[in-house]
Amino acid sequence: MARPKPEPVQVIKQRRDAALGKLVAGIPYLQYLGIAFERRGDELTAQLPYSEKLIGNPILPALHGGVTGAFLEITALVELNWAMIWEQMEGSPETAARIEAGDFPAMPKTIDFTIDYLRTGLPRDAYARARINRSGRRYASVHVEAWQDNRDRLFAQATGHFLMPSIDG
């Protein structure tokens, strides 16, 4: 019995990028803030492009704390959902086809989210990455770090706990 020929890497990358694009497009507040995600392998980096509407204190000027918090929480939620999608896309072809069609698992629900504002968010682009510390069937713990010009100089970080959606829906 002959083994099926593997798909070209470029086709797999396009399928993953399309799935991420559909996931991000389905979150209206993410669209309002202008947040975009870049994928490198299974790692996501969120980008919050600078806009005047994001300034909370025009005297400094500084990014609004609520925008910073939303940016961190959205990054954590998308990372959790992407981790679920990633596993499912690598599974059966039927599941991969459902995800390609935009049939995503439900978003996790926030239990708590603690933000550490380490320094003023300057009026420029911001970036964030989330790391899943623990993810089980019912609960997940995620740590998020945000920076602007230098990855080693964080301006905010957060830890969140999330209720994972049931597998049935």
Image: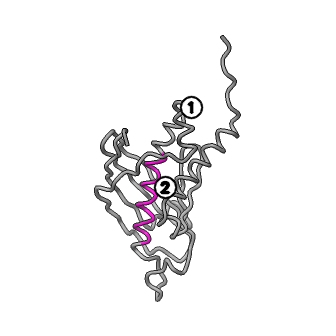
Kindly identify the residue that appears in the image at 68 percent across and 14 percent down: 2
Name the colouring of the figure: one colour
How much space separates mark 1 and mark 2, taking CA atoms? 29 Å
Q: Residue furthest bottom?
A: 59
At label 2, counting other C-alpha atoms closer than 10 Å, the crowd grade (few under 14, some 14-19, many 20 or more) is: many
Q: Earlier in the sequence, mark 1 or mark 2?
A: 1
x then y, percent, for residue 90: 54, 34
Q: Nearer the viewer, residue 49 or 6?
A: 6
- Considering the image in quadrants, where does the N terminus appear? top right
> Is residue 74 in the magenta section?
yes
Please state the extent of the stretch shown in magenta in the rendering.
Answer: 67-82
Task: Determine if the magenta segment contains residue 48.
Answer: no
Question: Left or right: 163 with respect to 57?
Answer: left
x, y percent for residue 100: 58, 43
Q: Amino acid at mark 1?
A: Pro
Q: Disc 1 marks which residue? A: 93
Please name the residue that numbered disc 2 is placed on. 129
Q: Is residue 108 left or right of residue 154?
A: left
Q: Residue at x 53, y 64 (%)?
A: 35
Q: Residue at x 46, y 89 (%)?
A: 59
Circle 1 — which element?
helix
